[in-house]
Image (tube, rainbow, N blue to C red):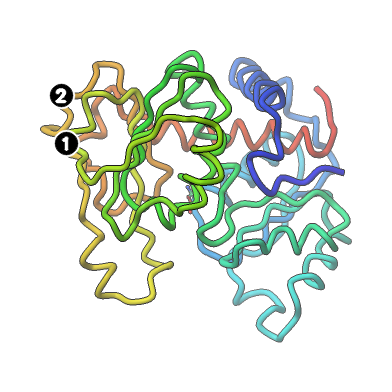
């Protein structure tokens, strides 16, 4: 039985297979409409979500399966003091697969020990968000045709932005990738990403505060929200939240084929005036997330078309 805790749980070959499946679903979704008939997905969301939870649910419906679950910890028996291990063990009696979001880093690993069915990490605290990375990878592959020789700018809250951590892990496995890490000093990428991932692999990276100076060299610009919910005090959040706002004038020096990404939700990081720019890919990411989650559910349930 396979779980998905971290994007590195999937090999490069497996990511290629998931992309092939997602592309086939995009080409002929009807072919997949009954493959999960009789199967149930439980979505256990202990933290708010729009895209991840609803795209998992849409994915399972489009595969012909069923969905159960909760969208807030308040409506589960954890409010009565039940442990996560017991909650998940109970849900494993009803569902064939579980997608879980939790504010505590590592919580999905604890869940996977007792669930008895595959568990998917749908975001754990500031740690990682592997299924967002699957959405990001399909988007990059569709826009750029490959993962190689790309200069990727990651901008905003690189400290708490779990999508950033997962994307760096994933893209570090491809040839010729370079990173430009754009953040205020207080929200720099955690040291372990530099010392345990980028430096041992010899991947070129540069840390900077300046979005304007970095834009011309980028193939991908991945904007992120400052993660209000991970801050210890409101004052720091208010001071940092609008450090970067991508507006049309800042894109004048950008490449014509720049791919502008954001995992969403956005607050102010990208002006809505950018939405009509053909380089804006963030709503494509939303849709691509559903296709990749369909492919992932099929893989973990070992169902074939
Ligand atoms: N990208 C993402 O995880 O969005 P939600 O928080 O809405 O699920």
* Residue 287 showing in the rendered view: yes
Tag 1, which secondary structure?
A: helix
Residue 167 at x, y percent in the picture: 51, 38
Looking at the image, can residue 133 be seen? no
Q: Name the residue under label 1.
A: 212
| Disc number for residue 241 | none
Quadrant in the picture for residue 301 = top right
Residue at x-position 58% and y-position 69%: 72
Q: Position of residue 173 (x, y in %)?
A: 58, 28
Q: Relative to residue 160, is residue 28 drawn left or right?
A: right
Query: Circle 2 sits in a helix, a strand or a loop, which is it?
Result: loop
- Considering only order in the chain, which callout, 2 or 1, is on the residue closer to the N terminus? 1
Image quarter in which the C terminus is found? top right
* Mark 2 residue crowding within 10 angstroms, few (<14) / some (14–19) / many (20+): few
In which image quadrant can residue 123 be found?
bottom right
Q: Do the residues labelled 1 and 2 touch (CB within 8 Å)?
A: yes
Measured from the top left, where is residue 22 in percent x and y? Answer: 63, 24
Q: Distance between the residues labelled 1 and 2?
A: 9 Å
Say whether mark 2 is within 8 Å of ligand 1.
no
Image point 30% across, 17% down: which residue? 257
Residue shown at 30%/24% (left/top)? 279
Figure check: 190 above or below 176: below
Q: Circle 2 sits on which residue?
A: 253
């Amino acid at each position: 039985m396979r779980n998905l805790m971290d994007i590195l749980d999937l090999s490069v070959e497996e990511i290629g297979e998931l992309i092939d499946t997602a592309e086939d679903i995009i080409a002929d979704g009807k072919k997949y409409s009954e493959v999960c008939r009789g199967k149930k997905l439980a979505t256990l969301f202990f933290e708010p979500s729009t895209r991840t939870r609803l795209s998992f649910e849409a994915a399972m419906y489009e595969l012909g399966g069923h969905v159960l679950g909760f969208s807030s910890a308040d409506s589960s028996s954890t409010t009565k003091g039940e442990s996560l291990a017991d909650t998940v063990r109970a849900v494993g009696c009803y569902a064939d697969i579980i997608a879980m979001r939790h504010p505590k880093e590592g919580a999905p690993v604890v869940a996977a020990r007792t669930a008895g069915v595959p568990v998917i990490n749908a975001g754990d605290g500031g740690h990682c968000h592997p299924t967002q990375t699957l959405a990001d990878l399909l988007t990059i592959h569709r826009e750029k045709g490959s993962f190689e020789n790309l200069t990727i700018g990651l901008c905003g809250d690189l400290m708490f932005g779990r999508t950033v951590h997962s994307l760096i892990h994933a893209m570090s496995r491809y040839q010729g990738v370079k990173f430009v890490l754009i953040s205020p000093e207080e929200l720099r990428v955690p040291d372990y990403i530099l010392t345990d991932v980028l430096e041992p692999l010899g991947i070129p990276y540069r840390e900077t505060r300046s979005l304007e100076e970095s834009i011309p060299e980028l193939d991908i610009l991945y904007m992120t929200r400052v993660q209000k919910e991970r801050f210890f005090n409101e004052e720091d959040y208010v001071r940092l939240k609008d450090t970067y706002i991508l507006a049309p004038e800042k894109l004048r020096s950008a490449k014509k084929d720049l791919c502008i990404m954001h995992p969403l939700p956005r607050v102010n990081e990208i002006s809505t005036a950018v939405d009509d720019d053909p380089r804006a890919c963030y709503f494509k990411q939303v849709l691509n997330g559903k296709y990749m989650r369909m492919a992932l559910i099929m893989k973990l349930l070992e169902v074939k078309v």
